Image (cartoon, rainbow, N blue to C red):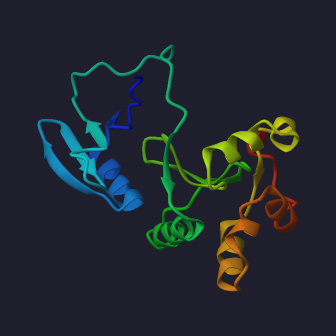
Amino acid sequence: MTLTPKFAHVVFQTSQPDAMREWYCALLGAHVVYEGHGLTFITFDDEHHRIALAHIPDLERKSARTALVNHVAYTFDSLDDLLDRYLELREKGIEPWKPVQHGVTTSLYYEDPDGNHVEMQVDNFATADEATAYMRGPEYDADPIGVRYRPELMVEARRAGVPAAELQTRAWALKTSPELPHPMAD
C-alpha cells in the first residue's frame, strides 16, 4: 500500500520576521504558536505549525545559484470563500499582484514582504478526474497558464447572483477583462 503524504509546513528564511509574521497571519487568518530564538511558528488549522520563519543572523543566506520555490498554494472550499478572503485582505492593504484564471483553478497570487509568492485558489472542478480531463483537453493544452481577471468584477458578479460555475471559467475572465496582459507578460 502506498501512503500519500499531506502538506505539513513551509519554512521561510527572512531578515524581516515581524513584517512576515504579520503578513502571513493576515493572509491566512493564522496565529503564532511559538516565537523565540530566531524562530516563529504559525498555524491556521489543527496542525501545530504550517509556516515557520527563521530569523537567525548567523544562518547562511541563499546564494544566487540556489533553486527557489516559485510559490506556495492554499486552497479554499468555494469561490465565495476565496472572494471573502480577497475582500478581507484588501481591507488590510494586501492586494493580489496577479489574479489568474488557470481554468483548472481560480487563483489570486500575492507577494509577501520578502518577495515570496503565495497562491490562494479554489478548484474549478468538483473532482480530480474532471480537473485532469480538463488539463488533458485543448483549451489547457493551448495555454496551460491561463488568463488574468479582475477580482473586483468577480465580487460584483457574485453579489449580482451570477453562479460561481460561470465565473470560474476562462471565458468569463476573457469577456470581462480582455485588455489585461497574459500572466507571463510581466
Locate residue 179, reporting x and y percent.
87, 59
- Picture coordinates of residue 93 (x, y %)? 48, 67
The answer to whether residue 127 is seen in the rendering is yes
Of 96 and 104, nearer the camera is 104
Of 103 and 1, which appears nearest the observer? 1
> Residue placed at 72% from the left, 73% from the top?
153
Viewport quadrant of the N terminus: top left
Q: Is residue 8 above or below residue 76?
A: above
Q: Nearer the viewer, residue 104 or 147?
A: 104
Image-based side of 5 in relation to 52, left or right: right
The relative height of residue 146 versus residue 27 in the rendered view (above or below) is above
Q: Residue at x 49, y 62 (%)?
A: 94
Residue 151: quarter of image: bottom right
Which residue is drawn at the image coordinates 38% and 37% (left, top)? 6
59 relative position to 10: left or right: left
Residue 145 can be seen, yes or no: no
| Residue most extreme to the bottom | 160
Quadrant containing the C terminus in the rendered view: top right
Location of residue 54 (image quadrant)? top left
| Closer to us: 1 or 90 | 1
Residue 86, percent from left and from top: 53, 66
Q: Position of residue 133 (x, y in %)?
A: 75, 41
Q: Is 126 on the left or on the right of 37, as rendered?
A: right
**Residue 82 appears left or right of 113:** right
Q: Residue at horizontal 40%, vertical 20%?
A: 62
Which residue occupies the extreme left position in the image?
A: 37
Hey, which quadrant is residue 150 in on the image? bottom right
